[in-house]
Amino acid sequence: MTTRTPLRPLARILRARAEGQDPAHIEAENKRARHDQINDRARRRAESRLIVLGVVFFCAFGAIGVKMGTIAGTDPVEPRAVAAGNPIIGQRADIVDRNGRILATNFDTYALYAQPPEMIDPARAADELAVIFPELNRDRLLADFTGDRKFLWIRKQISPEQMQAVHDIGDPGLLFGPREMRLYPNGPVASHILGGASFGREGVDSAEVIGVAGVEKRFDDFLRDPANEGAPLELSIDLTVQAAAETVLQGGMMLMNAKGAAAVLMDVRTGEIIAMVSLPDFDPNNRPRPLTTGDQSDSPIFNRAVQGVYELGSTFKIFAIAQALDLGLVNPQTMVDTSGPLTWGRFRIRDFHNYGAQNTVTDVIVKSSNVGTARIALQIGADRQRDFLGQLGFLAATPVEMIEAPTGAPLYPRNWSEISTMTISYGHGLSSSPLHLASAYATIANGGRQVLPTLLRQDGPVTGPAVMRPETAQAAVDMLRQVVVRGTASFGEVPGYQVAGKTGTADKPKPGGGYYDERVIATFASLFPANDPRYVLIVTLDEPEDTSGTEPRRTAGWTAVPVAAEMIRRVAPLLGLRPDVAPVAISGVTLTSN
Amino acid sequence: MRGILYVLTAMAVVGLGFWAYHENYATQAAIREVRALHTGIGAGHQRLNILNAEWAYLNRPDRLRDLVEINFDRLGLLPLMPEGFGRVDQISYPLPDLLPITDPVEVSSDGAPSTTEDPL
């Protein structure tokens, strides 16, 4: 305990007064001494606090440094005690059809690579490899093995048998890297929809599997997203129906000597595509390369149903008629002038036959009169027709979930003149894909509510905006039914399924302008059953020719319609549609009493 | 009193050490088991994946169609056609089983007293 000296000690004050000095000096001196003491104490305390703080910081940084050193110096390990979620999921999710049947899945395989510096006997390894893989060139392999390369891939995928054979060579310079490969177990079924996959970035231990076309590319991010925990991509396709449709279309294409064919089967309530076929097709397990020369539409990878834009001919007539009905310009019984040819400027519009001077609107559709349809289209006018076709989806690419969809954008005239109005009303001058036609017919079949095509499974009906009144849609369906009952599509009648539809035969345009005389696109756009439409089926044949008669017949009624009818016969029972046959009188019932 | 407290504390420390030792090894054993299970699940997934792929491959529509054609003599399978649908009244109802006869009536004339008289 320090002694506290008074600021004005009495003895010194008295002495100073006696000696005539100023006692205030004494007080000032004592005050200074006391301040010095206080400063010393404060400094000591601050110093000790700084030391404590320094030690704390030293320890903290030291701990962090030691931990960092440990982390840097040890091998990384996965936290094994955590068992949350599903740790083992494939690199890429499966694709399944609407019933859960696998369309695309993954398969574990191996890639073969070589490290020449490690090799013991390069000549023997090259010999044996050339035996196992006949497509490899022995001399080229030997040159690679004996050159100055340190690493080379030999094969991207090998089968287990090949792997064992390579293993038996026993050269330490031949090594295997694990791979996941994409497998399409159904082969060419639904090949255009699925597209295909290939490897992206490749390492020794793994390789990315990326989609290159179709839904594989469109949903690449979804399929590779680990957050989905391997949930498969559910398509609206029905594998059984798709396979049956492909078989029938393949047979029909051969019978009709066509060079290509496409078919689209769509559920009218949801817009789900149940089957979509384009022939010729390919095996997505071994996707062919795009053509480097010639017309891409001749390649098997070309999807005629989505990418192929064609003038679809008379199948378009029902749109002009439906719009005229909806606008109240005509009713099904209105008489229309069908005397031809109709001359407009330098254009002459004529019919396949002469159908007489006047016909009802229903008969214009049933007999497929270009002149009658063109006259009705003139009443509608260019702007209204353009708007209506736009609402039916004919002025933009289809929104279907495929990477190729934007390439199937329709072709239509920039200047929508009156002559365009007339030609488009019977399907010339506007090119669109069969899928466009399917969704437009589905809109009619769905009571006039817009239907957008989709490849994803829907859980319930999708209600789009109204394009026409339900009564108009019903009247249009009734007319289409008459086409099959007594018109150009009489081969389309399938007992029990009340098929309604419209044929279309369009001359193919020449690349340089003008049209071929003997090459046509034959289309049958149908919906069934007519009393309660559930499905729309479009069948398109490219350059068909029915040679069963005395002279070749190319019209859709002789080519596309029989194929479509056979397809409906095969496919409708698979879709669970019961044929609606007239009830047979019950016979053989005997009333008894006892 | 203080001595007993020290002894008890020391025993508690020894006991806790023993417990911690066991817990440590039990945890490591559990982690090893989890790792083995994960490996097993991984192998199981891989096997399941391959089996699924093989099942899909064996059931591919082309192969089934070919098999149906090859075995047509034995199986006689045809594609599902509209004619395949029937009506309910085309199905015959199963015949009810006969009830057991509990009260038999003898109708045979076998063993009946013979008459020589002419009935007329």
Image: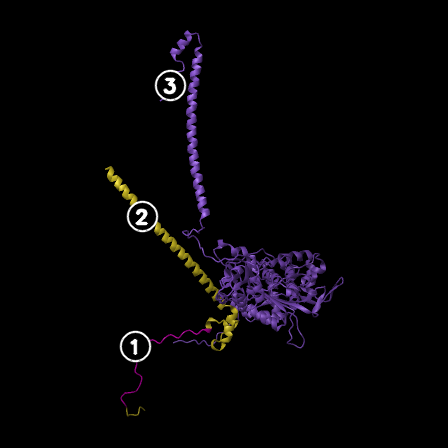
Q: Does the magenta stretch include residue B96?
A: yes
| Element carrying mark 3 | loop
- Segment colored magenta: B90-114
Which quarter of the figure is the C terminus of chain A placed in?
bottom left
| Circle on res. A4 | 3
Point 46% across, 65% down: residue: B51
- At label 1, counting other C-alpha atoms closer than 10 Å, the crowd grade (few under 14, some 14-19, many 20 or more) is few
Provide the chain ID for the residue under circle 3. A
Name the image quarter holding the N terminus of chain A.
top left
Q: How crowded is mark 3: few (under 14 residues within 10 Å), some or many (20 or more)?
A: few
Q: Can residue A584 be seen in this view?
A: no
Whether label 1 touches label 2, CB < 8 Å: no
> Of B104 and A38, which appears nearest the observer?
A38
Q: Is residue A427 left or right of residue A145?
A: right
Q: Is residue A458 above or below residue A75?
A: below
Label 2 chain ID: B
Does mark 2 fall on the same chain as mark 1? yes
Measured as percent of width and height from the top left, residue A396 is found at: 63, 57
Real-space CA distance between mark 1 and mark 2, rounded to the nearest whole angstrom: 81 Å
Point out the tag, 1 or 2, that comes first from the N-terminus: 2
Q: Name the residue under label 2.
A: B19
Measured in 3D between alpha carbons, the distance from the residue under mark 2 to the one under mark 3, in whole angstroms, is 61 Å
Q: Is the magenta stretch mostly helix, strand or loop?
A: loop
Across and down, in percent, residue A306 comes to 61, 61
Mark drawn on residue B73: none
Question: Label 1 to label 3, Cα distance in Å?
Answer: 134 Å
Q: Is residue A68 left or right of residue A326?
A: left
- Residue A351 in the image, given as x and y percentages of width and height: 70, 68
Placement of A170 over or under B7, stated as above or below: below
- Tell me the residue at 40%/55% (across/down): B35
Chain A: give its colour: purple
Chain B rendering hue: yellow
